[in-house]
Amino acid sequence: MYEQWPLAKKQSTLRLRARILQELRNFFIARGYLEIETPCLIPAPAPEFHIDTMICHDWFLHPSPELCMKRLLAAGYDKIFQICRCFRQHERGVRHLPEFTMLEWYRRDADYRDLMEECEDLILHLAAALDQDGAICYQGQVIHLQKPWERITVHAAFEKYASLSVEEALAGDRFDEVLTARIEPNLGKEAPTFLYDYPLDLGSLARVKKEDASVVERFELYMAGMELANAFTELTDGEEQRRRFVKEEDKRRWAGKPSYPVPEPFLESLQGLEGAAGIALGLDRLIMIFADALHIDDVVAFPPETL
Amino acid sequence: MYAASDLRKNLRIKMDNEPYIITEFNFVKPGKGQALYRCKLKNMISGAQFERTFRSVDVFEPADLQEKKMQYLYEQDDKYCFMDNESYEQILLTADQVGDVRNYLIENIEAEVLLFEDRPLGVTIANFMDLVVTKADPWARGDSVSGNTKPVTVETGYVLQVPPFIEEGEKIRVDTRTGEYLTRVKD
């Protein structure tokens, strides 16, 4: 017998999802952002060692709209946002869908610190609109939203929560393992947390920090131990970006992963860009927080297995 | 061979020449980081459990497990004797290997014995078994409040909750996966 219940019981969550989408648009439009749309199907994604794209004919379903969005930024569109579907091969779990919804926004003349503040304002706006003023209760845990939120460097987080240093973790290829097992569960517990300043090799599209050439200006936003967003002060040096792409592409080739063409129009467009910052936020996960949902499947109508 | 992306709950793999079953599975991946496959594994011989995190480069051998149709014969000294339907060979399983299934074992029933390189690991039987009630308190008439249950003992010695109208000597159907009463059976 065909079961209506699994879909029918999601109605209140899907209504909440629609409200959040509406409120996100209200927030960005009120701040002078232009909503744009870029193609899902692209000939050359940014090569990243740990992100596997889905191949569609000879092109790729984008794992993020970042390259097209930065081209618009470079062409003079100074504040843009997009809500779109992104695709990542083999990513499936309690917090992962191979097709998921991303919110990305980009600003000229800004850096990652400006985006931290904008994240605070965005989530405070949503909480107020959803009558969850000041605090959100997620899985029995109260997360207070008063500004400013916790800011901790990757270096300090390893020192505080892990038994080894960032350098030791990187040398032993244990960075992600330690991050997910020891550090992430402690982040964003009482208030949202910005984890920032990542080691040089972990941010192939981010600018090197002026005061400390060993890190890039990148942050991740966490709530309730869950990674919600990744942001950069964007790298705008086309030659440096090309070198980093070649490096990632080499790593991909060594691991036997499919190789990507070089995204030439993107690299050329960077000439038109100086200071800029951009951020990608996993919308399904943000909705999980507001819907108090433990599983990402609870906040979308159709997880792939139900199709 | 399995790749890490094939890992899932209940998959059975071979490591260091022993069979393991994945009892819990979690996919973890920082957005820009590597995919990690956090598993809880149980050794299917010793029952020992532990956690292990695998990476996308890891590969696994499937555990070469066989299921053989056998007949249950008898129990003696906490050992359970089964006979291979084809070779008529008899093997003994321990109480641990038989597990909850012993609650439903009556002589001569069909069973599937799970083997790893000829070593027995466990046994499964039909999802539903009809068992005779050997001990039950009489039904206090008037006690008809729906939802009321009482304990009874069936022929295997297993005690379970049933509706109050079930009486000694009757046959009931039990779900062997949950151990719960399903319905009264008329012969």
Image (cartoon, grey):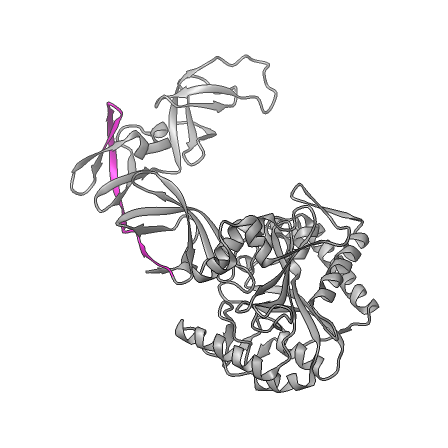
In the rendered image of this protein, does residue B134 appear above or below residue A194? above
Q: Can residue A190 be seen at all in this image of the molecule?
A: yes
- Residue A130 falls left or right of residue B133: right
- Residue A190 falls left or right of residue B138: right
- Residue B61, located in which quarter of the rendered image? bottom left
In the foreground, B126 or B78: B78
Question: Looking at this rendering, what residue extends furthest in the right direction?
Answer: A30
Magenta residues?
B58-81
Q: Position of residue B124 (x, y in %)?
A: 33, 39
Q: Position of residue B141 (x, y in %)?
A: 56, 13
- Residue A77, located in which quarter of the rendered image? bottom right
In the foreground, B102 or A143: A143
- Residue A282, located in which quarter of the rendered image? bottom right
- Residue B177 falls left or right of residue B89: right
Q: Position of residue B158 (x, y in %)?
A: 39, 23
Tell me if residue B31 is in the magenta stretch. Answer: no
Quadrant of the image for the C terminus of chain A? bottom right
Q: Residue at x 47, y 61 (%)?
A: A170
In the rendered image of this protein, does residue A53 appear above or below residue B41? below
Q: Residue at x 62, y 77 (%)?
A: A67
What is the magenta segment's predominant secondary structure? strand
- Residue A52 falls left or right of residue B13: right
Q: Position of residue B66 (x, y in %)?
A: 26, 48
In the rendered image of this protein, does residue B139 appear above or below residue A24? above
